[in-house]
Image (cartoon, rainbow, N blue to C red):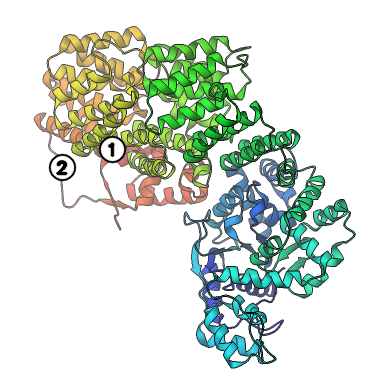
Amino acid sequence: MTGSDSFKHGTAGPLVGRDSDLRRIRDLLGLGAGGGALLLSGDAGVGKTAVLDALAEEAHAQGTRVLRAAGVQCEANYSYSGLNQVLYPFQDALGELKAPFRSALHVALGFESGSPPERLIVSNAVLLLLRTVAARTPLLLIVDDLPWIDRASAAVLGFVARRTTGIRVSLLAASRSGSRSLYDGGALTEYRLQPLDKESAAHLVSTRFPDLVAGARRHLLALAHGNPLALLELPSALPTARGPAGEVPAVLPLSRRLETVFGSRVTALPRPSQCLLLVAALEGTGDLGVLQAATRQANAGYDLDDLAPAERDQLVHIDEEVRRLRFRHPLIRSAVVGNSTSGERRAVHAALAQVLVDQPERRAWHLGEATLEPDENVAALLEHAARITLRRGDAAGGMRTLIRSADLTPPGPDRGRRLAEAAYVGAESTGALPSAQRLLAEARQAAPDHKRSLHSAAATAFLLLNGDGDIDTAHRLLVCAIETGTHAYDAQDKALVDALDTLALVCFFGARHDLWQPYYRALERLKPKAPPILSALGRTFSDPARTGAAASEELDELVAELAGVTDPVQITRAGTAALYLDRLGDVREAAWRVVRMGRGGGAARRYLSGLIHLGLDDYLTGMWDEAAQLADEGVQLCETHGYTAFVWYFLYIQAIVGAARGEADEAEATAERIIRWAVPRGASCAVHHGHHAAAVAALGRGDVAGAYEHANAVSPAGSLASHVPHALWVTMDLVEAAVRTGRQTEAAGHVRAMREAGVAAISSRHALLTEGCAALCAATDDEALQLFAKALAVPGAQRWPFDFARIQLAYGERLRRSRATIESRGSLSAALSAFEHLGARPWAERAEAELRAAGWSRRRTETSKVHTLTPQELETARLAASGLTNKQIAERLFLSHRTVGARLYQIYPKLGITSRAMLRDALESGSWSQDRH
């Protein structure tokens, strides 16, 4: 148990004026009960650390095991460094975990080397470890200076915080008010610690400084505004009964005033003590072993015993149990660094770099801080460290390290290359578009041939797409860099692969045959062969109607590799390849991993891709509420990071879901917004998406002529436009609109084009649509009915509920018109049930009208029993009905699989069913309602 006795009457007395705060925090935190989580916030010096100490002491006295960690600015870039502090005492307990969890934690905490583990596995491993330890002894985890905890640790601790209740684990974190924190998303309930009231402040001063003259006391109380640290530290700078002393300017911010006070206390220490404190401040973790080794490396003639004066003056505390030093307050660390010279800091960084040989990221960072002039060896080490950071999914940290690497690179092409790669990471991953623009300008100055740099070209292309540039300009820039560069078309060249991936995106945006030709040429030149992901993109993302089916086996391999992958780039590239083969469902689990990483502070650009893939799959599979929620999240994310070139994806999801639900006016307005943005930039693919949403909206309102115009704008009737991927998604809309406007020849021609291209081989959805479209324009009833039956019998076709129900509706309409009135009711009733479940109001109204014409009436009896499901139960039931396992549902809803099972156990009786297999029919039957409260 660690902690100081700051802000107390004496070394063991209670805190002054904090009784009610302590009681409230205990209640919110669940100390002594089942556990809980809380964020303690407040101004600098308000007493957060003292409150943490008091609660820690109390918990320790009651038999709770207390673990402490503190965020450190220089450690914020090291993944899982904060977690290492928390779990360091539990190294022996790691052996009790099962192999996958044990291995993941060993790698994450730096005890072993290996591939970076998936963050969800690390999070579950930490939770399991804490539950295991807490089963023997209750745990209290205290994290001070939360904003400086590294992103990876913060995400894991947030995961734990949401699951502490009932497992005898409590998490208490502290953060200065107004500091940006990774807990801003609401993982922790916040308690704001206020300054002391006037009576408590006066009592504290009179008790601790009884000799302070009345005038000085009044001055102090007015200056401190109830801030306990100021009340205790500023008297040394104020007049006393024995005479005047120096004055502290009242205009300075309080934290600055306190840094001034702490600075004077640091400089009053013996020189060896000051030197050791500087080593501790710059090392960051407080590891006594590292501090001792660094002082020996510096050959300074002092050792850890020289910390005694700082301990006696309560500037630092030594935790003997975990052998770590902790500064009593963050401002002390700031004062130590602020009172040192640049030469002293460089010497300490150099000594630390010599000690940390087994930690390449930290060693490279310290070398970078110790180096003034360009040094290629140090720059190369920093570049290697950036690679490690990027593989962990920390794009922002990787970008910062690349920039420092470039700063230390001698003039020449390597400096420009590193700046260009930092710009690429900023533009393509982190969303730091202004920084990327500045870095590109620096790369231009560093290397005259920067325009041929692959990463420069890729970064510039992203900036063009997200600015006022156009597709053709971005395309020319990329093609020039790829075809005139000095590379040897090496398939292992990361910069070349990144540039080709960007080129594929630009070609997709442009949706033209000529744009893709340089991409195809580059794939043919790659040695020894094109990477599978680039090859797959060249078939599934370019002209999937003609080449997509041939890439199925290649996509199988890409999907199979995602099982243990944490790299968001690999995951989202595979998702992109899966999109037009209707295989997004195969990458859902991996896509959710990317989204969770993004929500925890991961790469924004890949976070967007994960949201896009999930939202599109949700639309196709009928989870429209979730699709709309993810689209809203995506729009907000684009606005936050300046990714204007990707907003249209989310606007399309909003528009297509709204169109299907009958919100025609809003959907058409959104579609028009997409088109207005896309046309001047030459982003034809976005234009096509806008027309698709408008076509569905027009069909919903009964404007079949308008629907035909919009669908025909994507791909003219009678052909599947070359290299227009979205032509696959408008086939049903185009054929239906053509038939209903009397364009039988155009409709038949389009079906013929679908068959010639073999689109039915792409997926069960396209097989369903191919036969359904053929049935729509069949010349005779017999032929039509046979084709409808064939369409509805396609294996797996029911996975696409909206498309399937539309075919059922068309089948029922044809049956009724062929005078098979009774037979039509089955298909029409099934279609009506599906449309009502989806919320597809226009289609539900159309199905109900057909049913009435077939002699059916909806039965409404006041005595019919309507079962009420809560929103949470309804969401769980729908996910279970879609075929997800309890484990998959639990991951989606951030629950335990046991909670999911219990929820389903409550749902079954409400729906009058006894098994999971009956869920879908029960939900479609309409014998339930949603509890809105």
What is the C-alpha distance between the residues marked 1 and 2?
20 Å
In the rendered image, is residue 117 in sight?
no
Q: Is residue 717 above or below residue 358?
A: above
Residue 207 horizontal/vertical position (percent):
64, 89
Q: Quadrant of residue 919?
A: top left
Instruction: Judge by depth and name the residue closer to the eye, 406 or 697.
Output: 406
At x 55%, y 14%, the residue is: 484
In the rendered image, is residue 325 in sight?
yes
The secondary structure type at the circle numbered 1 is: helix
Name which residue type carries label 1.
Leu
At x 18%, y 31%, the residue is: 700
The mark found on residue 859 in the picture is 2
In the picture, which quadrant includes the N terminus? Answer: bottom right
Residue 577 horizontal/vertical position (percent):
47, 23
First in sequence, mark 1 or 2: give its number: 1
Q: Quadrant of residue 447?
A: top right
Name which residue type carries label 2.
Arg
Residue 823 horizontal/vertical position (percent):
18, 24
The secondary structure type at the circle numbered 2 is: loop
Instruction: Judge by depth and name the residue closer to the eye, 461 or 800.
Output: 461
The mark found on residue 603 in the picture is none
- As drawn, is 354 to the left or to the right of 150? right
The mark found on residue 838 in the picture is 1
